[in-house]
């Protein structure tokens, strides 16, 4: 009975190796949650003191502004990914380091990554 367990482990390892770094499965909900976490995550512990010192309206305006800037950066990154050679329909897995290597000089690539 140990042989099937070894076969299952080998099969599972092969599946993990095949899917690591290859699947694009984050989806809309996952990407919105990552964006929200990246936007508000580091500031969440400072929000009570910011609201007390500057007021809730100014804090809300700054958060909305940062959200708009983040959306603009996401659109520019998406545009750069679509202009990457052979990736007009986003069929190739392109990461940020690939984009910086393609578009930037070597010195700027080292700083960006």
Image (cartoon, rainbow, N blue to C red):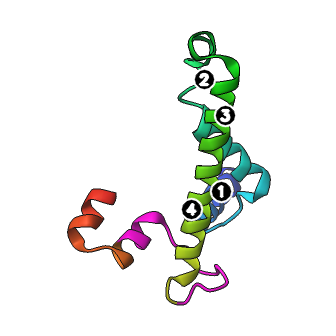
Label whose residue precedes the other's in the sequence (2 or 4)? 4
Q: What stretch is highlighted in magenta?
A: 86-100
Label whose residue precedes the other's in the sequence (4 or 3)? 4
Q: Nearer the viewer, mark 3 or mark 2?
A: 3
Q: Name the residue under label 2.
A: 44
Secondary-structure class at tag 2: loop
Reply yes or no: does residue 8 show up in magenta: no
Residue 67 x %, y %? 65, 45
The reply to whether dot 3 and dot 2 touch (C-beta < 8 Å) is no
Q: Magenta residues: mostly which secondary structure?
A: loop
Q: Name the residue under label 4.
A: 20
Question: In the image, what residue occupies the spot 76% across and 59% down?
Answer: 27
Label whose residue precedes the other's in the sequence (1 or 4)? 1
Q: Nearer the viewer, mark 1 or mark 2?
A: 2
Label of residue 61 in the image: 3
The correct choice, above or below, for 98 with respect to 59 in the image is below
The reply to whether dot 2 and dot 4 touch (C-beta < 8 Å) is no
Label whose residue precedes the other's in the sequence (3 or 1)? 1
Label of residue 73 in the image: none
Crowding at dot 2, Cα within 10 Å, few <14 / some 14-19 / many 20+, comes out as few
| CA distance for labels 2 and 4 | 32 Å
Label whose residue precedes the other's in the sequence (1 or 2)? 1
Q: Quadrant of residue 65?
A: top right
The reply to whether dot 1 and dot 2 touch (C-beta < 8 Å) is no
| CA distance for labels 1 and 4 | 26 Å
């Amino acid at each position: 009975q140990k042989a099937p367990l070894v076969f299952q482990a080998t099969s599972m390892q092969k599946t993990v190796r095949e899917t690591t770094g290859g699947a694009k499965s984050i989806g809309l909900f996952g990407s919105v949650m990552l964006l929200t976490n990246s936007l508000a995550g580091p500031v969440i512990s400072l929000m009570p003191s910011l609201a007390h010192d500057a007021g809730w309206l100014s804090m809300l305006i700054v958060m909305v502004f940062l959200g708009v800037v983040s959306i603009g950066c996401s659109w520019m990154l998406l545009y750069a990914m679509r202009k990457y050679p052979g990736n007009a329909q986003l069929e190739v897995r392109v990461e940020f380091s690939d984009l910086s290597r393609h578009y930037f000089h070597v010195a700027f690539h080292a700083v960006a990554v």
